[in-house]
Amino acid sequence: MADIILKTEGLTKHYGGVHALTNANFEIRKGEHVAIMGDNGAGKSTFVRQITAVEQRTSGKITFDGKEVAFEGPLDAREAGIETVFQTLALADHLDVSDNLFLGREKILFKLGPFSILDYKGMREATRAALQKTGVKIPNFRNTIQNMSGGQRQCVAIARTATFHSKLTIMDEPTAALGVQETAQVENIVRTLKEAGEPLILISHNMRQVMDLCDRIVVFRRGQIVANLKKEETDGQDVVAYITGAKTQPEYAEAAA
């Protein structure tokens, strides 16, 4: 279908004899927010690493924005339009907000032989627009990352996705280490992305967060997808039953056996 932004078919990852991910069939449509849930070691992060080419898949097919893709690395995925906020954030502590947003994608004013003059003004203006778009409030974005709170760091990482008009945003446990107020700020950014019609994959253990922010919940268990649930047709207790293995949807029962 034309509105499917990402689709995986039979996506599999083996580490020697360990089957970390097996036959993952997944899709997300434009504008849709999908949660991925499961216990630690269920295959959630492995799945994301294959999509973003942090690792190379053992087998399977990935279609992104209507084309079959075989990204060689995370930079290829990012250039194609997949922005990922990992738990580690991947921010440079000694740089300010603008420098972090454009790290590896700096705006060039002009080149002098082997040397380049950076467009600092253009990068600051784009940073201001990105922060405004996502509702991120940072009083002075020329401060270095090391002088910011955990919530501000997380918001900078998320704002980076808005700067480059990503076709798909992936967030891996974006509020796991944050306090109540900082979590609320990140969740407001997610709502802003939803209002803008931007698709999002959210990996989270926070049931309340998932039910508030997502349209659909995909449950992983032991490296396999065991449930694909519409939010309005399920509840937290039902989701937990799939996570623990007490329930498996019929279409996934054979694979999960």
Image: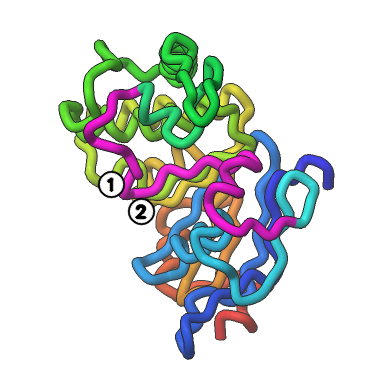
Q: Residues within 10 Å of mark 2 (few under 14, many from 20)?
A: some
Question: Could you tell me which secondary element the residue under label 1 belongs to?
Answer: loop
Q: Position of residue 217 (x, y in %)?
A: 54, 52
Vertical arrangement, residue 70 with respect to residue 250, above or below: above
Q: Position of residue 216 (x, y in %)?
A: 58, 48
Read off the residue under disc 2.
205
165 lies left or right of 145? right
Nearer to the camera, 125 or 13: 125
Q: Are marks 2 and 1 in contact (CB under 8 Å)?
A: yes
The mark lying in front, picked from 2 and 1, is 1
The magenta region covers 69-97
In magenta stretch: residue 244: no
* Spatial CA span between label 2 and label 1: 8 Å
Amino acid marked by disc 1: Ala
Amino acid marked by disc 2: His
Vertical arrangement, residue 170 with respect to residue 183, above or below: below
84 lies left or right of 196? left
Read off the residue under disc 1.
176
Q: Position of residue 218 (x, y in %)?
A: 55, 57
Task: Say which quarter of the image contains residue 57.
Answer: bottom right
